[in-house]
Amino acid sequence: MSVTTYKIQDNFMVANCIKCGRRPVVAQDAYTWIVLCPNAACNNSVEGKTANFKAWDEQNKK
């Protein structure tokens, strides 16, 4: 199944992926919002009922 991803606006502060350094994107799958790294090899994501950027930032702290 293919999920459409959406770019996060550049003026929105969000941490880059700790694994590859790329800026995350947002996707919606049925009732779940996913903040994920666009690099599929990283397999780095956070899921929830809302786009949880705080959880993403916590997961991607240096």
Image (spheres, rainbow, N blue to C red):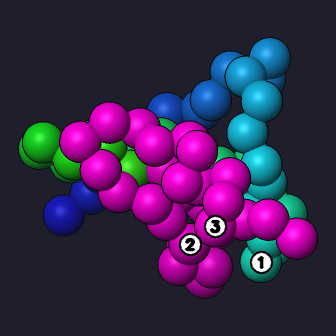
Q: CA distance from mark 1 to mark 3?
A: 11 Å
Residue 43 percent across, percent down from the top left: 53, 78
Residue 11 percent across, percent down from the top left: 80, 17
In this picture, residue 16 sits left or right of residue 43:
right
Residue type highlighted by circle 3: Gln
Label annotation for residue 50: none
- Residue drawn 79% across and 54% down? 16
- Residue drawn 73% across and 22% down? 12
Quadrant of the drawing holding the N terminus? bottom left
The quadrant holding residue 47 is bottom left
**What residue span does the magenta drawing correspond to?**
35-62
Crowding at dot 1, Cα within 10 Å, few <14 / some 14-19 / many 20+, comes out as few
Task: Report the residue marked by disc 2.
Answer: 44
Residue 41 within the segment the image draws in magenta: yes
Position above or below: 28 against 1? above
Residue 2 percent across, percent down from the top left: 27, 57
Label annotation for residue 19: 1
Among numbered discs 2 and 1, the one appearing first in the sequence: 1
> Marks 1 and 2: in contact by CB < 8 Å?
yes
> Marks 3 and 1: in contact by CB < 8 Å?
no
Task: Report the residue marked by disc 3.
Answer: 59
Residue 43 within the segment the image draws in magenta: yes
Residue type highlighted by circle 2: Asn
